[in-house]
Image (cartoon, rainbow, N blue to C red):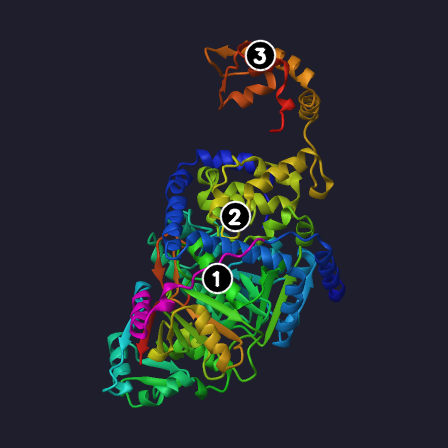
Amino acid sequence: MSVSVRDQILVRLRQAPARAVGQRPAVAPPKETGLAREDRIAAFCARFAEQTGIVYHHDPAREIGETLAEICRAHDIRRVISGCDAVLAAAGLPDAAMDIPELELRTQAGFADREEFAEAVFAWADAGLTGADYGVAESGTLVLAFDRNHARLLSLAPGVHIAVLSRDRVVGAYEQAMAELGGVREIPSQLCFVTGPSMTADIQAMPFKGMHGPGKIIVLLV
Amino acid sequence: MKVTTEQYRRVAAREMADEYTQGFLKLLPARLAERRKTAFADFADPAAARAAGAAIRAGALENLPQLLTDFEKNAKAAGARVFWARDAAAANKYIVDTARENGISGVTKGKSMITEELGLNQALAENGIHAWETDLGEFITQLLACPPFHIVGPALNIPVGRISEIFLEKGLIAEPEHDPVQLGLAARRFLREKFRHLEMGITGVNLAAADSGTLINVENEGNIRLSKSRPRIQVAVMSLEKVVADMPDAMHLIRLLCRSCTGQQVSAYVSMDTGPKKNDEIDGPEQLHIVILDNGRTRIYENPVTRQALRCIRCGACLNACPVYGQIGGYPYGWAYSGPMGQVLSPLLLGFARTRDLFSACTLCGKCRDVCPAGIDHPELMRYYRHKDAAGDPDFRGTGAPRLEKAVYGAYAIIAGNPALWRVFGAMARRAVNCYARGNTIGKGPGVLKGWFAFRDLPAPPDRSFRDQWKRRSPAPHSAKPASGRKKP
């Protein structure tokens, strides 16, 4: 029966009289697409900070584990669930975090069952640690492509999201991130733009962070 | 939700007398309009950006059957199940059946105007399934059983005292609480338990990209992401006009939507789903059901004039620009869609008999059109509805103008179409109306005209018509030749 409803709808739409469509004016790409690399990274960081995001610049002379330990100490994070995605791996994570003494670390690969995993991200973890596939300078946005090594709830259920972003992956505009992503992998089941913490202003227009998702978002720039 | 569009006048009068609403309306629309303006300033050419949005939406509609076919094919290839629903009843039945087959007793819902249109919560409740609204504003309006005040913040106008009372009653808090942040956090704790355990999530769709079969949701709170990530079953309800050609088109519309809606460059979360989770993923839905809803939209589409109403991307910029909304707020519009958006959509979806007051209550000032990122000409539509309603067009369930109005305009059409009659009528009318003149203005009229003059004055017409005066002042040869006899050079 649904097939016939489908066809009826499509037939009626096809038979409807056409209406002329005007010319689409050219729209200049966001100005951030024209920035040099360091300026682009600076623009990303500035926009990300406007949304109360916190940026840590990793000093390549240090161990990545040290920087992560510093972040966890500063934000009172003791229990972390980590993804196992390629961005993290390239930065030496989560392996390098295993040695941080005051940190309890679990990785999503350690969960066989979705229920067990969900309980951990909702009720156990202080923070979720993931890679970010891209940073977009035009609005200080992180692009997350989810897959078997990067679960959706890591950046959503715990109170803090720590995202590792490579300086090589900061682009000017959304379209650039999408195009690059499309060139290297199949379309993910979900792709997400994250710009700042979860927020609302639904009561008396009083804004606050952490409505349903993380109240704090931290980028570790490597 | 209950439709109360026919009570427009009564509710509008109540809201205009309500000090709290009035105080609120003095602040909110202006503040949102200002934020929108600021956000648009970072486009290199804001006007071109808006015109491009209009062109994308218009182009997508002209290509709609093809885009829908492509969307369906690609979404199915990614593993989604697609159901075409003719009307609200069919959509609701499909969703209820899906819940039952999977043994679901409760669902989490992301904010979605389309499910308000369907009355989905009611349909689920009748089948013993509780739908939890999880957007903070929607959650509060659901508990209070009141309609949305504004599309961006449906409960923005509710005083904290009332929220505190209902949260106490429902056991969300133990002591009265008047801090908006603490109230919000109480709702977070309460709804987090729902997200943790419920196995079905229902969301609307902001946009869909045909070339990849991708669904896009725009939000700030994370409740939509949670509804799409935690449960085993996801249902996305999409009215059939939401589809655009591809991701670049969608990206531009997202820039416009977020700026127009809350004045953000982009909302906190924009999530894009292509099919259900892959087999090896540890979270995300195992089943993704996409309900493509018609519910009267093919009829709206078939008429090339009303088709433009389907361009709407539900940003709410028109509400903030509208001088009428600014006086009465969202309640009088009586349904899911308020402000100019509601004045344009509700009459088409519900028929004119119940919505006549909506399109009558418009000054045709055009401020909504000036801010619309989809290029909808609201005043054109409003005039069109008035015309169709007066003509009693059955396609719109118009009932026709009252007999007296018809007789008056019928006679006027005859007189205005005949120069000799027009001159006689003009002379008579001039004399008649000047009986009511005080000095140079007419401030009142007899009988049915009393109402019209309640808020308006007319300048008193001079004793002689323009043509008369022209004749007297001009030399004889010209007066013999009327203007219609213009010679070619």
User: Which amino acid type corresponds to the residue marked 3 in the rendered image?
Assistant: Lys
Q: Which one is earlier in the sequence, the residue at label 3 or at label 2?
A: 2
Q: Which one is earlier in the sequence, the residue at label 1 or at label 2?
A: 2
Q: Position of residue B417 (x, y in %)?
A: 69, 23
Taking the image as drawn, is residue A174 in sight? yes
Q: Chain letter of disc 1? A: B
Question: Residue A47 magenta-drawn?
Answer: yes
Badge 3 crowding class, 10 Å Cα cut-off, few under 14, some 14 to 19, many 20 or more, is some
Q: Which mark is residue B147?
A: 2
Badge 1 crowding class, 10 Å Cα cut-off, few under 14, some 14 to 19, many 20 or more, is some
Q: Are marks 1 and 3 on the same chain?
A: yes
Disc tally is 3
User: Which amino acid type corresponds to the residue marked 2 in the rendered image?
Assistant: Pro
Q: Which mark is residue B10?
A: none
Question: Judging from the image, what secondary structure is the residue with disc 3 in?
Answer: helix
Q: Residue B471 carries which label?
A: 3
Looking at the image, residue B89 sits to the left or right of residue B340; the answer is right
Q: Where is residue B355 in the image (x, y as percent from the top left)?
A: 61, 40
Q: Which of marks 1 and 3 is in front?
A: 3
Q: Chain letter of disc 2? A: B
Question: Residue B17 magenta-drawn?
Answer: no
Q: Nearer the viewer, residue B390 or A115?
A: B390
Q: Do labels 1 and 2 share a chain?
A: yes
